[in-house]
Image: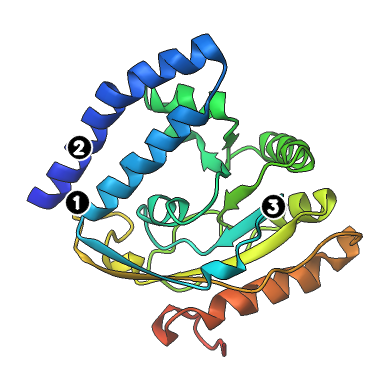
Amino acid sequence: MIRSFLVISFVMIYILVVGAPYLIYTLVSGNSDPIYRVGVLGAQLAVRMAGVVVEARGQERIPANGPVVYMVNHQSNCDPPVVVGLLPPVLILAKQEFFRVPILGRAMRRRGFILVDRKSREKSIRAIEEAVGSLKAGHSFLVFPEGTRSENGRLLPFKKGVFVMAIRSGASIIPVSISGSRRIMPKGKFAIHPGRVRVTFHEAIETKDSSLDALPDVLRRVRQAILAGLAPDEWPLGAVA
């Protein structure tokens, strides 16, 4: 509990003390690169403060140029800060709760992060359309195809929206497996536990010149790749990686 309190307090103070002046700079200059960099730095510091050791594999598979959609399984709230620290600049499809955080939410909007309202199909479709436009403009994205965190750490079924945005934009997909993060921050628990998290980047899956008819096959290939980087107790029951 003490570790959790310290990490959360650090994040709040960092957003206020560091984020606020950089947000003002962004609003005045229109340049969001500096606030993105200090945001990533803050995430990395929070991960270290939480006692998380990150073991990354396959980073040589990260393309030099975008656009790329990094599709990651989702076990814990520590997944985004762990993964974003390993990537070149990306935008994120994020749930609306993050956009309500003072300073952070404004900074996310200015950077081009896209709000996903999971309760509204119409707004979700609009978010995917916006993401397609950003991908076509050359921006890469970090997304979580399960749409929510797994309560037991086992891989959940994938939502189709993120595959639609990748195929319609012709972006490459990099499947990413994150293993062990549920033990750090289980869903529904306040406590943060130190531990090791393994992040595996898999071979790119190309969608250029593909139609939406290819969606089931692309989804299957992404899912199979992510499963290959998970421990057996993180597989869906009955699955074989």
Q: How crowded is mark 1: few (under 14 residues within 10 Å), some or many (20 or more)?
A: some
Q: In which quarter of the image is the C terminus?
A: bottom right
Any part of residue 111 in sight:
yes
Residue 191 screen position, x and y as percent: 18, 55
Q: Residues within 10 Å of mark 3 (few under 14, many from 20)?
A: few
Residue 200 screen position, x and y as percent: 49, 72
C-alpha separation, residue under disc 2 versus residue under disc 3: 34 Å
What residue occupies the far left of the structure in this picture?
2
Which one is earlier in the sequence, the residue at label 2 or at label 1? 2
Q: Which amino acid does label 3 sit on?
A: Asn
For image coordinates 34% across by 45% down, the residue present is 43
Q: Mark 2 points at which residue?
A: 10
Which one is earlier in the sequence, the residue at label 2 or at label 3? 2
For image coordinates 74% across by 43% down, the residue present is 135
Which secondary structure lies at badge 1?
helix
Q: Name the residue under label 3.
A: 65
Mark 3 vs 1: CB contact within 8 A:
no
Residue 60 screen position, x and y as percent: 56, 69
Q: Mark 1 points at which residue?
A: 49
Q: Which amino acid does label 1 sit on?
A: Met
194 sits to left or right of 93 = left
Mark 2 vs 1: CB contact within 8 A:
yes
Q: Nearer the viewer, mark 2 or mark 3?
A: 3
